[in-house]
Amino acid sequence: MDNLNDMERTAQEGPVGLGERIRELRRSKGLSQEELADRTGVSRQAVSKWEMDQSLPELDKLLALSRFFQVSADYLLKGEERAQPKKADARIFAVVATALNAVGLLVAVAGWIEEQTARSISGGLVVTTMGCMVFAVGRIVGEQNSCRRADKLFWPLNLWLLAPIPLAALIGALARLRFGPFDFAKAWVRPKAVALGLAVYVLLCAAGDWAIVRALARKNRR
């Protein structure tokens, strides 16, 4: 109890940079004043007053800020400790993963056109697997708020990039079961077949994007 009283007295003794520290920590997490207010159970105006040193957080709100930012109350009030180092931005991993998936798709398509065998697309599959692993690592080591933004960046784009490989494999397997061995390229190069395949592909990707965007919106509202 004495320590808490000491912290309150310290905050009342004069400008200690509390508002500036709250503002820097908020920005490091990519949050707006309104988002921080929601996390701490106060109004946006209250957060604004804290950051402008027009008022001080109540003791329970100060402790809530300390837990949320993962710093000590002493750091908030006096700056005696350094805040924990910022985590990586997961969006960088999402961009790198998307680039790898795009390269993997091109490699797989080129191999299939050349040889039309399962082995010919294995190189592309390896590259896309690496891309997915990079994104997974980013979700693990990335800062929480940047992970949510990385999801919005990665999934709607990569659904279009990752779907063709399993989709083409499924269509090829079904076609061979139905028609037996045949020249795949010659059979599917016909305009009607290409148009039908593209139409089905676009519809599937659009439906997947819609479902992902709705799921992310529901998750962010929680």
Image (spheres, rainbow, N blue to C red):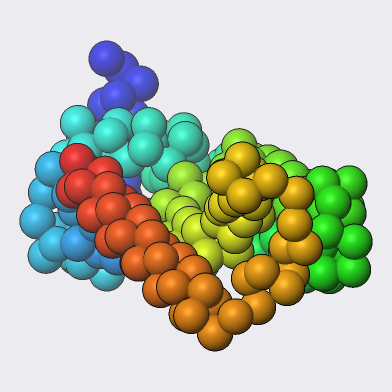
Considering every residue shown, the one lying at the far top of the view is 1
Q: Is residue 185 visible?
A: yes
- Could you say which quadrant of the image residue 110 lies in? bottom right
- Could you say which quadrant of the image residue 200 lies in? bottom left
Residue 127 percent across, percent down from the top left: 81, 53
Q: For the point 13% across and 43% down, which residue is it? A: 41
- Could you say which quadrant of the image residue 183 lies in? bottom right
Q: For the point 82% across and 69% down, which residue is it? A: 113
Q: For the point 89% across and 46% down, which residue is it? A: 119
Residue 27 percent across, percent down from the top left: 43, 63
Taking the image as shown, residue 156 lies to the left or right of residue 134, namely left
Query: Along the line of sight, which residue is nearer the eye, 44 or 100?
Result: 100
Residue 100 percent across, percent down from the top left: 76, 62
Q: Where, quadrant-wise, is the N terminus in this rendering?
A: top left
Residue 71 percent across, percent down from the top left: 48, 37
Query: Along the line of sight, which residue is nearer the eye, 11 or 169?
Result: 169
Taking the image as shown, residue 132 lies to the left or right of residue 26, namely right
Q: For the point 37% across and 37% down, which residue is it? A: 68
Q: Considering only vertical position in the picture, is 199 above or below 149?
A: below
Q: Considering only vertical position in the picture, is 140 above or below 204?
A: above
Q: Where, quadrant-wise, is the C terminus in this rendering?
A: top left
Taking the image as shown, residue 64 lies to the left or right of residue 172, namely left
Q: Considering only vertical position in the picture, is 170 above or below 109?
A: above
Query: Along the line of sight, which residue is nearer the eye, 53 or 87?
Result: 87
